[in-house]
Amino acid sequence: MEVGTVYGGYYGAKGYEGVRKEEKWADAGFAGKVAEKGAVSPKDMTLDEYKAYFDEKMNSLYTHPSQRGMNWTIDITDAAYKKMQEDPEYEKKILDALAKNKAVDFGGNIPVVAYTHIDDTYEKCYGYTQGMKENVGYSGSSSTKQADAGREKKARQKELLEEYLEKRAQAKRQQQELLDEKIAKAERERSRLAKVWSSKQQMARVSSAYESNIMTETAAGGEVK
């Protein structure tokens, strides 16, 4: 599952909560200082310097207001940092994916748990969320018109769902009635055939008994009238 696909957009505005907080630099504006110097290339940095440099760029990405208050975790492996440090195109690809994720509008509901994993290949990157909760702050900032429109939309969706369920139930009832009718018809036919067979068997027994009686009388010298 790739970062930036359907699992994208799970990262809130509280800030980066990666698994390597102890490695984050205390100096603010590290990327800016590097830019001011204009002499230090990411490839020339130590790994710790590059981590601070990349994390600052990541944290500066725009975050949609609907994600305010959402807790999120980004786990970046050392191998991923090294790959981005050596490959500017890969760094750009990851930042673009994160930017897309952070710009997602969750509306009035946001995930309860959000997580993304970044590794040294894009195929090994993934993200997921679990649960949803009401985004009270974001919902409260919506206009009355938007709230009314949302309620009307939900009411219409509920109405359409009820109509669909009723039609589906009716179709099932009709199918069951047809099935019951077929079963009843088959049972009647089976009963009729059983009666015919029983009648034929009875006639065969009578005929056999009659023939047996004739043979007995003939053998005894009786007349056949």
Image: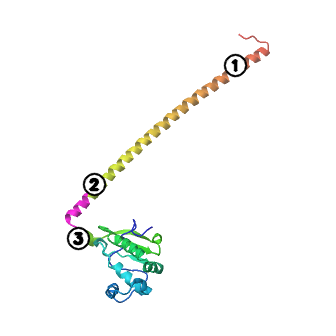
Labels 2 and 1: the sequence-earlier one: 2
Three-letter amino acid code at disc 1?
Tyr
Labels 3 and 1: the sequence-earlier one: 3
Report the magenta residues as a range. Answer: 140-152
Measured as percent of width and height from the top left, residue 174 is found at 41, 41
Image quadrant where residue 140 sits: bottom left
**On the rendered image, what quadrant is the C terminus found in?**
top right
Mark number displayed over residue 156:
2
Q: Which residue is mark 1?
A: 210
Judge left or right: residue 78 versus residue 37: right
Question: Which residue appears farthest toward the bottom when viewing the image?
Answer: 27
Most frequent secondary structure within the magenta stretch: helix
Measured as percent of width and height from the top left, residue 44 is found at 42, 86
Is residue 43 visible in the rendered image? The answer is yes
Three-letter amino acid code at disc 2?
Arg
Magenta-colored stretch includes residue 151:
yes
Q: Viewer-proximal residue, 118 or 85?
A: 85
